[in-house]
Amino acid sequence: MSDEKERIVEWMKQQKKSKQYFNDVCKAVPELNMRQAKKFINELVAEGKLKYWSSGSTTMYMLPSEGDVAKEEEGMA
Amino acid sequence: MALKHQTPMLDELEKGPWPSFVSDIKKVAARKPMAEDLLGVLELSYKEKEGHWKHGGIVGVFGYGGGVIGRYCDRPDLFPNVAHFHTMRVNQPASKFYTTDVLRKICDIWEAKGSGLTNMHGSTGDIILLGTTTDQLEPIFYELTHELGMDLGGSGSNLRTPEGCVGKARCEWSCIDTQDIIYDLTMTFQDELHRPAFPYKFKFKCSGCPNDCVAAIARSDCSIIGTWRDDIRIDQEAVRAYIGGDFLPHAGGHESTKRALDIQAEVIDLCPTHCMEWDGKNLKIDNKNCVRCMHCITIMPRALRPGVDTGATILCGAKAPILEGAQLSSVIIPFIKMEAPYDEFKDFVDKLWNYWMEHGKNRERLGELIQRQGLGAFLKACEITPDPRMINTPRFNPYIFYDPADVPGGWEHDPKAFRERHQA
C-alpha cells in the first residue's frame, strides 16, 4: 500500500467519529490537492479498505471495521 | 382482493377528481407484497404522525459511490416486506427520449427484482426505481448496464445526473444542442458522477433558450442556457398577420379561437426593458436592450425568432433552501459558443470545481460559497474578468465585493466615524 493510502487509513483510525466528510479525509494528506487525494481515497474504496456511506444527499467515508453498520441498518444487530 | 393492512386514512386520498398515488400503489399491491407493506407503513405514519423510514446507509454497487439510496423501515416486525426499500436512480437518456422497448425492459427488471413502483421522473431528472432489497442491487445494476446500456445516476456528494430540455430535437427556439451537451458532460465527467469527492451535490442543467424549460436558473449549480448575440429575426408580414387575427397568439397554447392580437398591450407594454416599438406597420426592436425574456417570441412564434449567432450564457450558484434561502444562478459567462467538444466550458468547470473543492465547507453548495466569499473571489479563481452583466444592479447587489487592491487609491473605512455622521 502506498504511503498516502497508509496515512489516510491511519488518520481514519484516529478519528472519534466513524463517518468522515471527504474534505476532512483529505487532511490526512495535506500536501496533495483534493483531486490528487481523491485518487488514493477511491483506490482504498475499491480495495475494500474504506467504505462509502451516503444519506442520499451527502456522502461520507468510513472504515469497514467501524461497527457493522449494515447489520445495524437492517435491524439485525 | 383484500389487502393485508387496513388503510382508512390513505383511502381518503383516493377521493376527488385527481389521480391518486394510493390507487396506484394499491394496484401494484395486488401482486407485490412490498407495495402492500408500503401502504401499511404509510398508514401507520399518518396515524402516528411519525416517519418510520431510516434514510441512508452503506448500500451501493461495487465501485460506485452514488445511484443507490439506502432506505430501511424501522418496523420490520410489522412490515417485513419493506425492511429494505432502497431507491435506485437511473441516468435518464438526454431529454428523456426512450424507445418503448427500453421502457418495457426497465419495468420488467423492476417488476422482477424491485417493488414494481417507479417515479418517472424524479425532480433530478433520473428514473427513480422505488424499493428493492440489498441482495438485488448488483443483479439490477448488471441488467441495466449489460442489457439496456443504461447507468446509475448521481446521488450524494457527486455530480448529479446532468439534465437538459428537449432542445433542437423538437423545439425551434433551441439555440444550443442540449442533448449533445448533456450526453458529452455525462460521459466526460463519469468519475465525478460515480465517485463522490465534492463538498456536496453539484448539478448541471441545460436549457436551449431563455424560456428555460428545465428551470436551470433555479435548480442547478451550473446553468447552461441558450441565447443569441445578434438580432431577433422579424417577419413583419407575420407580425401584421397576428394583429389581423390570422394566427393564434402563443401558437394556440392558451386559446383555440382566432383573435386579433393587441400588440401594444400584449407585447410592447410587457417588454421588461421597453425596447420594442410598433409604428402601425412595422415592429422595431432595440436589440441592444433586449434581456432575452422571450415573451415577444413566445407570443408570436410565427413572426419572431431568436437570432442566428447562437450560444449559451453560463450561470452559477442556484439552489433550493437548506442552509440558506433559495438562490437563482448569477451570470458568470454572458456568452460562450458552446460547440463540441466544449473544451472552453470544461476548462471553466475544472477551475470552478478546484475552487469549490478547496474552499467549500462540508455540505456547502457552490452558490453558498460564492455568497460567503463574494463573487470577486469566485471570478478570480475561475480567471474570469468581471462584467456588468453579471449583476442586475451594480452597487446594489451585495453579491459582489470589490477588492480594494483593484481600486485606484484603495479605500479606508472608519465605521465608528461613519456612525457618528449617520446616527439615526
Image (cartoon, coloured by chain):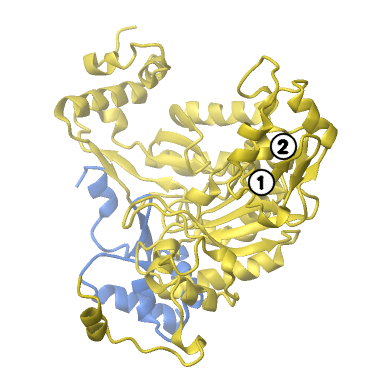
Q: Colour of chain B?
A: yellow
Q: Is residue B55 left or right of residue B209?
A: left
Write the residue at 38% across / 14% down: B30
Q: Which residue is mark 1?
A: B209
The answer to whether the residue labelled 2 contacts the one labelled 1, judged by CB atoms less than 8 Å apart, is yes
Where is residue B139 shown, x and y percent of the image?
A: 50, 40
Write the residue at 40% across / 84% down: A30
Identify which amino acid the numbered label 2 is placed on.
Answer: Cys
Q: Nearer the viewer, residue B391 or B238?
A: B238
In the rendered image, the residue lying farthest to the bottom is B409
Write the residue at 22% across / 33% down: B76
Q: Nearer the viewer, residue B249 or B143?
A: B249
Q: Colour of chain A?
A: blue
Q: Quadrant of residue B167?
A: top right
Q: Marks 2 and 1, Cα distance to the nearest angstrom?
A: 9 Å
Q: Mark 2: which secondary structure?
A: loop
Q: Is residue B171 left or right of residue B105?
A: right
Question: Mark 2 falls within which chain?
Answer: B
In the rendered image, the residue lying farthest to the top is B1
The quadrant of the image that shows the N terminus of chain A is bottom left
Q: Mark 1: which secondary structure?
A: loop
Q: Residues within 10 Å of mark 1 (few under 14, many from 20)?
A: many
In the rendered image, the residue lying farthest to the front is B279
Q: Residues within 10 Å of mark 2 (few under 14, many from 20)?
A: few
Where is residue B367 shown, x and y percent of the image?
A: 44, 62
Q: Which residue is mark 2?
A: B171
Question: Mark 1 falls within which chain?
Answer: B
